[in-house]
Image: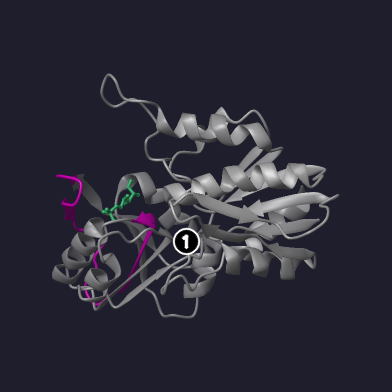
């Protein structure tokens, strides 16, 4: 097996190769002066099962993924597995208003052309992956998040809304601490209203878990509601730290004590690694 790391996921891909004890090749990716993507896998041949690790967000990374798929086939890859730690456009999973595209489906159809298997992590809606013709699996980051916080003296695990209640349950059960969910109402793209958990938060050290943080609006509102409800500390851990518009700065300057995410998107707070769970899935085949 050979792991090819795209420019979005170098550290993660390298760590996976080390766990799997297999060859790692870093694709050399740059931009042409006009902004178009250029990538090259510097080897004579890839006569093996190849795993490409690359996000499809933001748009340039999606293009790089298409180019890498073509390059590995040309180099003779026997099979191609796409590991897409953060799947771009996954939230546009249906037509909300007439005249819109089904963006997530469009992405799957195009990525489908050069792969034999797809692995994602905590994709927004798993059903999106059914648009691939090949086998696919969506892995869960909950176990690595729970293991990271096991010794961090957490009293209560919460999700910001009922939709993510299963994640709080999985993390809470693995950590052996109670779990619950908050009630979230989205007011706009950046504003949300959060109602406190039914469970008593007074004097509790709370961990909020979510699939992603984008603007940070959800988590900032949740942290402030929990503080008002008497929580002594509030930490947050998400799978995908998208962090748009200086969200990390706004989150660290809010009622939160700790902000962490997994390394599906590599950034200054992506200290929880999903390499082991992806490596295990790749090994199982
Ligand atoms: C919503 O369904 C997701 O689980 C996240 O809670 C949401 O996408 C976070 O977005 P933001 O950080 O912009 O509030």
| Closer to the camera in the image, 257 or 134 | 134
Q: Which region shows up in magenta? A: 186-213
Residue 134 lies, with reference to residue 194, above or below; the image says above
Residue most extreme to the front: 33
Ligand 1 within 8 Å of the CB at mark 1 = no
Residue 56 image position (x, y, % from top left): 50, 47
Residue 199 vs residue 62: left or right?
A: left
Q: Residues within 10 Å of mark 1 (few under 14, many from 20)?
A: many
Residue 81 lies, with reference to residue 133, above or below; the image says below
| Closer to the camera in the image, 122 or 25 | 25
Does the rendering let one see residue 138?
A: no
| Closer to the camera in the image, 187 or 79 | 79
Residue 62 vs residue 248: left or right?
A: right
Q: Residue at 18% across / 71% down in the picture?
A: 227
Residue 185 image position (x, y, % from top left): 19, 45
Give the residue number, with chain letter if any, for mark 1.
Answer: 265
């Amino acid at each position: 097996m050979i792991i090819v790391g795209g420019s979005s996921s170098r550290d993660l891909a390298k760590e996976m190769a080390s766990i799997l004890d297999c060859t790692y090749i870093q694709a050399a990716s740059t931009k042409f002066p006009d902004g178009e993507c250029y990538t090259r896998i510097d080897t004579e041949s890839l006569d093996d099962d190849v795993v490409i690790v690359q996000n499809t967000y933001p748009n340039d990374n999606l293009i790089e993924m298409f180019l890498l798929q073509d390059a590995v086939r040309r180099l003779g890859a026997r099979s191609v597995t796409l590991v897409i730690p953060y799947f771009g456009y996954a939230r546009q999973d249906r037509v909300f208003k007439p005249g819109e595209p089904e963006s997530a489906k469009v992405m799957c159809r195009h990525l489908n052309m050069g792969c034999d298997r797809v692995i994602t992590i905590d994709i927004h809606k798993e059903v999106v992956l059914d648009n691939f013709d090949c086998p696919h699996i969506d892995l869960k980051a909950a176990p690595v998040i729970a293991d990271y916080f096991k010794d961090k003296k957490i009293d209560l695990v919460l999700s910001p809304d009922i939709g993510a209640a299963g994640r709080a349950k999985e993390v809470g059960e693995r950590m052996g601490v109670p779990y619950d969910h908050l009630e979230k109402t989205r007011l706009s793209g950046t504003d949300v209203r959060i109602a406190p958990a039914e469970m008593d938060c007074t004097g509790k050290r709370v961990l909020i878990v979510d699939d992603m943080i984008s603007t940070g609006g959800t988590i900032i509102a949740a942290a402030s509601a929990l503080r008002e409800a008497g929580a002594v500390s509030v930490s947050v851990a998400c799978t995908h730290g998208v962090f748009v518009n200086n969200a990390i700065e706004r989150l660290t300057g809010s009622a939160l004590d700790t902000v962490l995410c997994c390394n599906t998107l590599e950034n200054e707070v992506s200290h929880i690694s999903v390499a082991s769970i992806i490596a295990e899935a790749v090994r199982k085949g």
